[in-house]
Amino acid sequence: MTTTVVDESTTSRRRVGPVQRLRAFGRPPRLLGIDVARGLAVLGMVGAHLGDTPDDVTWSDPSTWDGLVDGRSSLLFAMLAGVSITLISRGRVRRDDHRLQVTLVRRGLAVLAIGLVIELLNTGVAVILPLYGILFVLSTLVLHWTTRRLWIVSASLAVLGPFVVALLHALSLDAYGPGLNLTLFGLYPVTAWLAMLLAGMAIGRLQLTDVRTGAALLLGGIVLAAFGYGAGHLIGSDRDEPVAYLFGPDYTDEDGNATNEPGYLTRLRESDEIERVWSTAMQYKPHTGGAPEIVGSGGFAVAVTGLSLLLARPLRLLLLPLAALGSMPLTAYTGHLLLAVGLAGGPFGGYDDPTNTLWGWTSLAMVVIATGWVALVGRGPLERLVAGVSALPPGPGATPAPEDADASR
């Protein structure tokens, strides 16, 4: 008798059709608004990599608004990673702490590995996945932090981190190494991205289903963005030189051979990096890593998240395709980079589309394919792979994280 009931239940689950899947998609415990925000981040990164966007955004000129995708999309992506980590760990930190940490470490290493494989294709894009994987690993160190501590450290990293990085770069006389480039002096300094991750983890602890929370995030994000970019324009620097690209005096001859270099103190005096610490740390343009950029773009990310949460419920049917794309960000991100390599004729190639037609058609195709995949299959292929690699067999009394709260779906 018991066996018959189980078989009927299993058969019933297997007969769930595409329409039923779409009707169930985005229902609690999954948050449709978070998927919508993540979908916007994916489309923004597609535009940043495949589109032709202006360097500066002028609010009085709508033709420049597509420049909003530069830099801000990846920061939004990082902040939403923090939100997702909180959703994964909610209720499990104390009860299933060790297993949760191992799962997050495995997940991070899997994402890191995928990122390294993509980098081997030499896409010409600064791939975010390696750092994204590292953020998952680092998150295991702060799972027990209070919400207040998360906010304080996040704000400190956002405001003070750029000054510390710029000073270290100046004092080290342009030190270079794979580790430094990955964590401090590259386009994705861990100080900026860890700030976004911690902010996302704090946001994930809010009552995200409450309309008041969405409104508070929207308004608070607008205030932060105005403050960050406003400070950048008033007292900051309009330079567009990430700290990774700043170099001191060149001690080589005309053939590129090293010459006799003076001592450290002499080189430090001859370099102007110390004088440029302020202007370096106070940049506000995308990917410069300045404090105004982190605060301003961080506020933009918070506002987009709040708006997505507010609109997800009344506009569920309209936003469902975008949310479907947001449910498989790893697959979508990887897919658009593979497309870029193909259009460029392979590694080391190049592709230019000043009309942004490719951006539009690629975005439409990704949304349609993602919606169909959710209806027919469910979880994205790379999300399924990462989940399989990071999953641990249930232990005594352990409760696995809800599938719908999975950060990589």
Image (cartoon, helix red, strand yellow):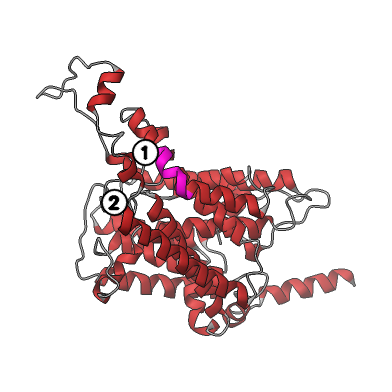
- Which image quadrant is residue 352 in? bottom left
In the rendered image, residue 172, in percent from the top left (x then y), is placed at 35, 27
Q: At x 21% / y 54%, what residue is drawn?
A: 350
- Which image quadrant is residue 18 in? bottom right
Along the viewing direction, whichever of 156 and 4 lies nearer the viewer: 156
In the displayed orientation, state which residue is furthest to the right: 1
Q: At x 49% / y 55%, what residue is drawn?
A: 78
- Residue 343 horizontal side relative to residue 203, left or right: left
The residue wearing badge 1 is 166
Magenta span: chief secondary structure: helix
In the rendered image, residue 56, in percent from the top left (x then y), is placed at 26, 63
Along the viewing direction, whichever of 123 and 385 lies nearer the viewer: 123
- Which image quadrant is residue 174 in? top left
Please determine whether, in this image, residue 57 is positioned above or below residue 96: below
Element at label 2 = loop
Mark 2 vs mark 1: which is more N-terminal?
1
Element at label 1 = helix
Measured in 3D between alpha carbons, the distance from the residue under mark 2 to the one under mark 1, in whole angstroms, is 14 Å
Q: At x 56% / y 71%, what residue is drawn?
A: 216
Q: Is residue 144 magenta?
A: no
The amino acid beneath tag 2 is Ser
Q: At x 46% / y 63%, what residue is drawn?
A: 224
The residue wearing badge 2 is 237
Q: Which residues are magenta?
A: 158-165
- Residue 243 horizontal side relative to residue 191, left or right: left
In the rendered image, residue 136, in percent from the top left (x then y), is placed at 56, 48
Along the viewing direction, whichever of 117 and 408 lies nearer the viewer: 408
